[in-house]
């Protein structure tokens, strides 16, 4: 996997880079933002990993799901990295981005 990733970076092509490019096309990317979407879309399993990882105790569990105390969040992104369900959201976004590209090419965009 590491060799594939390095090869992608060297050539500027490949699945990994496409995934990252697709993700950066969305404005919600820092701190709690992506994890917030994990909760909102219902893929959160309530494992609490995000809460345990937060250095400022900005997260607490409400009805089995993490909730943010906005004033305490420093948008470090640790909770996002720790979330085991985030990959699902990233892949969904990647697929949406691909669909958008196809649609744009049909209607004569890029
Ligand atoms: S402080 Fe960091 S770990 Fe805590 S909620 Fe904010 S982004 Fe997540
Ligand atoms: S780490 Fe992810 S799946 Fe686990 S409670 Fe937090 S948002 Fe939910």
Image (spheres, grey):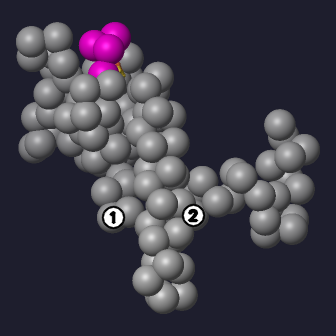
> Is the residue 56 above or below the residue 47 in the image?
below
Q: Is residue 58 left or right of residue 110?
A: left
Circle nearer the N terminus (2, 1): 2
Query: Residue placed at 46% from the left, 33% from the top?
Result: 88
Q: Position of residue 71 (x, y in %)?
A: 10, 43
Neighbour class for label 2 at 10 Å: few (<14), some, many (≥20)? few
Q: Is residue 100 left or right of residue 15?
A: left
Q: Position of residue 63 (x, y in %)?
A: 9, 12
For disc 1, the marked residue is: 27
SS at circle 2: helix
Question: In front: 13, or 50?
Answer: 13
> Is the residue 8 above or below the residue 53 in the image?
below
Whether residue 48 appears in this view of the structure is: no
For disc 2, the marked residue is: 21
Give the total number of marks visible in the rendering: 2
The C terminus appears in which quarter of the rendering? bottom right
Query: Residue placed at 53% from the left, 60% from the top?
Result: 98
Magenta span: 44-48
Neighbour class for label 1 at 10 Å: few (<14), some, many (≥20)? few
Q: Is residue 4 left or right of residue 37?
A: right
Q: Main secondary structure of the magenta part?
A: loop
- Mark number displayed over residue 75: none
> Is the residue 60 above or below the residue 55 in the image?
above
Q: Quadrant of residue 76?
A: top left
């Amino acid at each position: 996997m590491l060799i594939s990733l390095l090869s992608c970076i060297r050539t500027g092509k490949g699945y990994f880079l496409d995934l990252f490019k697709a993700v950066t096309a969305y404005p919600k990317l820092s701190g709690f933002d992506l994890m917030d979407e994990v909760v909102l879309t219902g893929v959160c399993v309530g494992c609490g990993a995000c809460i345990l990882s937060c250095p400022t105790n900005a997260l607490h569990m409400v009805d089995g799901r993490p909730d943010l105390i906005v004033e305490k969040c420093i948008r470090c992104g640790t909770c996002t990295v720790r979330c085991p369900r985030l990959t699902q959201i990233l892949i969904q976004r990647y697929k949406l981005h691909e669909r958008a590209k196809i649609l744009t090419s049909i209607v004569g965009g890029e």
